[in-house]
Amino acid sequence: MAMANKVIISCAITGSIHTPTMSDALPITPDQIATQAIDAAKAGAAILHLHARDPKDGRPTPDAGVFMQFLPRIKQATDAVVNITTGGAVTMTVEQRISAANTLSPEMCSMNMGSMNFALYPMARRYKTWKYDWEESYLLNSDAYIFPNTFRDIEKVYKTLGEGHGVKFEHECYDTGHLYNLAHMVDRGLFKPPLFLQLIFGILGGIGADLDNLFFMKRTADRLFGKDYHWSVLAGGRHQMNFCTAAAMIGGNVRVGLEDSLYIGPGKLAKSNAEQVAKIRRIVEDLGMEIATPAEVRQMLGLKGGDRVKF
């Protein structure tokens, strides 16, 4: 299924894991999100993975109205594929998490492939003061969070967005069992090839950031899906660039962005999403590969096209 020698760069612009105190570069307002997304696309990101935040204090929001404050601007300025979260934040219900995508009908959405512990609380120890009063409790309370994605939830998201809007999914697999969950759903006829797998490492509650796990996840995906899939890798924090490099070297695609890591190098905060995109692009091209264009991504993944979205 792979387009020879082409690597898809996805960029996750803001997410819902990091909080405003952690980095001044983290985009919070619609203007900041739009500006950083456009710059990331110019740097080489073919897919832009997007969450929304309340412009007043940066907390995650599922509000389609906030998404509409930045999506049209991104669409006007770039040809990049817009990928809207259905993960939202661990504090949201499934209905809240899919509400924006159900309204806006994007080409792609993320899809977490199983329920899991999703813990952020160790990050709270690094900070003594906070920009906003919601941040510390949001992180500390995550030791009690279960991020729910039951088979019924997954079916609901597929029928609402896949069948209802022609959305294709970035299947986020945080552990080996999530690959088997996806295979089960494919056997039931719920997702059609070509699949796009995002193999995720280094999130507390998911599989660890050990390279052996990357190779094991890839071998497992090969057994389950044959050649009917594309795959990408993201890794949390300090593992971001080395895991993406390893993935590119063995035929995978890559995801970077401030959702996944706030850093550009050891102890050095990234200035922007575009800085991370430029770095992984340079690595990919130095390895002798080319980055995929948005048009090539649409062909590879069988997307409906940017003219069929509602923003």
Image (cartoon, helix red, strand yellow):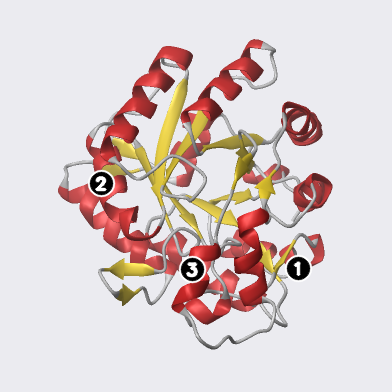
Is label 2 or label 3 in front?
Answer: 3
Secondary structure under the numbered disc 3 in the rendered image: helix
Tell me which numbered mark, 2 or 1, is placed earlier along the sequence.
1
Crowd rating for badge 3 (residues with CA inside 10 Å; few <14, some 14–19, many 20+):
some
Tell me which numbered mark, 2 or 3, is placed earlier along the sequence.
3
Question: In the image, is residue 248 above or below residue 57?
Answer: above
Is label 2 or label 1 in front?
Answer: 2
Secondary structure under the numbered disc 1 in the rendered image: helix
The amino acid on which the numbered mark 1 sits, given as a three-letter code, is Val
The answer to whether residue 87 is visible is no
The location of residue 256, given as percent across then percent down, is 41, 55
Question: In the image, is residue 226 above or below residue 304?
Answer: above
Crowd rating for badge 1 (residues with CA inside 10 Å; few <14, some 14–19, many 20+):
some
The location of residue 163, given as percent across then percent down, is 77, 28
Is label 1 or label 3 in front?
Answer: 3
The amino acid on which the numbered mark 3 sits, given as a three-letter code, is Met
The answer to whether residue 19 is visible is yes
In-image side of 34 versus 66 (left or right): left
Question: In the image, is residue 129 above or below residue 33?
Answer: below
The C terminus appears in which quarter of the rendering? bottom right
The amino acid on which the numbered mark 2 sits, given as a three-letter code, is Thr
Crowd rating for badge 2 (residues with CA inside 10 Å; few <14, some 14–19, many 20+):
some
Q: State the CA–CA distance, disc 1 to disc 3.
A: 27 Å
Give the residue drawn at x 34%, y 21%: 219
Q: Which residue is mark 3?
A: 123
The location of residue 102, given as percent across then percent down, is 80, 45
Secondary structure under the numbered disc 2 in the rendered image: helix
The N terminus appears in which quarter of the rendering? top left
What number is the disc on residue 66? 1
Q: Which residue is mark 2?
A: 245
Hey, which quadrant is residue 212 in on the image?
top left
Question: In the image, is residue 56 above or below residue 308?
Answer: below
